[in-house]
Image (tube, rainbow, N blue to C red):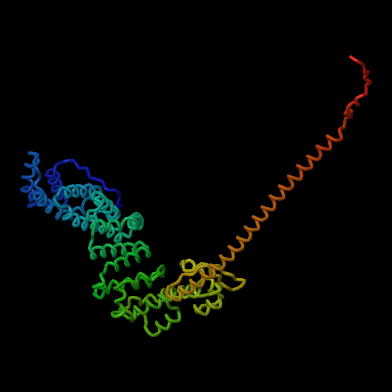
Amino acid sequence: MPAPTNTLLIEGSFSELAEEFAQYIDALRKAEGATLQSEIAPLLQPLREQEQSEGEPDLKQRDEVLKKLVSSATALNGAPEKEITSSYNLLVHLVHQSSDPDVFLPRICTYLAKPITTSPQFGPTLAISILTTIFNTLSTNDSSRYHVLLAIVAVIRQSGSGYAFEALKPQLTSQLETWLTAWELDNEEAQKLHLAIADASTAAGDDELAQSHVVKALETIPAADASQPAARELAVRALASALRRSTVFDFTPLTASDAVQALRSSDSTLFELLEIFTSDTLDAYEAFVSANPLASISNGVLADAGTALQTKMRLLTLTSLAASTPSRSLPYSSIVSALRIPDSDVEMWVIDTIRAGLVEGKLSQLKSEFLVHRATYRVFGEKQWAEVQGRLMVWRRSLESVLDVVRSEKERFVREGIQAAADQEAAAQGKFGDKARAGGDRRRNPQQPQSQPQPPAQAQPREVEAGAE
């Protein structure tokens, strides 16, 4: 599969390799008389002289040689299996030395898109391998890659190789848009590639990828050409495939297409059926089919799709029923009435709708109800916006109630924290006071007797004898 760009390394001058390739083609053809080698001999002589003198190659002369080599290269599909890859690689190497490889590569790709007769079993694998090599030898923005990719997709579709398709699919989903931008394709080329990928996807059983590329092909149709016969044919094909496919439930991309909108005039009955699948229910579908047999719609494009359409319509009806249930509790009896099915089939249809990704919920056999968790809106208009607004208001009120509870609990927590801190502080102060008082008691009431302080001695009066000095 396409990978980072690489290079083919083959030794030899252009004239030597061209002559070698011509000899090989003559051997495959078992040519007698005029041979490819004899045809290119006069053209190679001046090229040899230039190569010997190491002068600038005459690219126009090379192109003349390559025209003859490439036109004869169809014989390579009859080469022995072991020689096919190497012989094509040699031809590609020669083409890359031309003045404009884009002139020759598309023709080589058409050869490789045809069966390799000498290897019916491994021919497709060989062709894909060679085409991948060609793709990777081209620069990222080289428009020749478009022709190579077309050939790869064609080989995959013809061979029905699921392995090859799965190998290519990641590139298609991640790189294709980048490639298309780099290649600067016109609308017709882009449409051709998208339809080729859609065909290959259908052959590989990938309906989802196939439908997406059919829609992308529709998007390449300019509004001015929406009513043209080719646009009408593609629009009918896209619409019919979308209605048939069991995985397609979203018809918005189709209704947005100018070519599909143009079917209002050219295929009004088919367009009416699209509108029913877009927004209506099983009752409207059955009334429509009673008045318009499927075989009479747009040359019978849906003639054999009656069962598939009715099944899809039941799934869509159940989806609408679940989306419009205010209480989100859908009784089994309502499903039986809307889908016109036996009571015993209710749970089967609900499970199928869940598997289709249209609803989510829980079945309750005890209450005989389907509790809807999520339902897809088939049409999103003013009514649906009003319903969403109502649900958002309910959600907002619920959140406000929750916030009030959280706020009050937070305030209570803060108050209790403050109170607890105050209690702890008071308790700590009280304990400290008890210790202080206990210390004072010990000073006043010692356990060991202590000497009592004695009062100061009273001064005793003494007699003073008076006399003359």
157 left or right of 144 in image: right
The vertical placement of 459 against 362, above or below, is: above
x%, y% of residue 184?
A: 23, 59
- The residue at 32%/81% (across/down) is 268
x%, y% of residue 288?
A: 40, 82
x%, y% of residue 425?
A: 71, 47
Q: Quadrant of residue 183?
A: bottom left
Q: Residue pushed farthest front?
A: 468
Instruction: Please name whichever residue, 332 or 224, is drawn nearer the observer in this view of the structure.
Output: 224
Residue 282 in view in this figure: yes
124 left or right of 42 in image: right
The vertical placement of 425 against 199, above or below, is: above
- The residue at 30%/77% (across/down) is 263
- The residue at 34%/81% (across/down) is 269
x%, y% of residue 414?
A: 64, 55
Q: Quadrant of residue 187?
A: bottom left
366 left or right of 280 in image: right
Residue 352 in view in this figure: no
Instruction: Please name whichever residue, 187 or 135, is drawn nearer the observer in this view of the structure.
Output: 187
Q: Quadrant of residue 436?
A: top right
